[in-house]
Amino acid sequence: QVQVVESGGGLVQPGGSLRLSCAASGSIFIIYAMAWYRQAPGKQRELVATVNRSGHTNYADSVKGRFTISRDNAKKTVYLQMNSLKPEDTAVYYCNIDLHNGDTRGAYWGQGTQVTVSS
């Protein structure tokens, strides 16, 4: 059994910062890519950022220069540092972890954490 739990969301004013965390636990043999997605009301879920096992990162154009994804392999945790937040960043943020549990490889989702950017 694998569990993926996000934390760190909340309400922040425009221009502010938040740091999201996502930890995986349970039966995990190896973790491959880790990613953050977000879904705003009435919109499709979109990819925000990814980091592979080597630490190589990719970002959506809308967050480049403002968001930083990082991972701690020993803690099985991925982070998303969000700076210069804008109202359009308001969404539920989900982490997605591609891992092998010793039997099969699959992608696991967290439950989501709400980020609201508003004055």
Image (tube, rainbow, N blue to C red):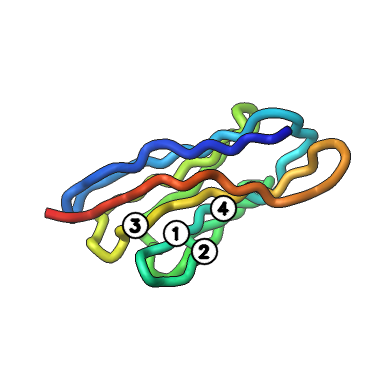
Image x and y of residue 6, in percent: 48, 39
The amino acid at mark 2 is: Leu
Q: CA distance from mark 2 to mark 3?
A: 15 Å
Left/right placement of residue 37 relative to residue 52 reads left
Left/right placement of residue 20 relative to residue 22 reads left
Q: Residues within 10 Å of mark 4 (few under 14, many from 20)?
A: many
- Of 66 and 85, nearer the camera is 85
Residue receiving disc 3: 66
Residue found 71% across the figure and 41% down from its top: 31
Image x and y of residue 98, in percent: 69, 49
Residue mark closest to the camera, 2 vs 3: 2
Which mark, by number, is residue 38? 1
Residue receiving disc 4: 35
Image quadrant assignment for residue 14? bottom left
Element type where label 3 sits in the image: loop
CB under 8 Å between callouts 2 and 4? yes
Residue receiving disc 2: 47
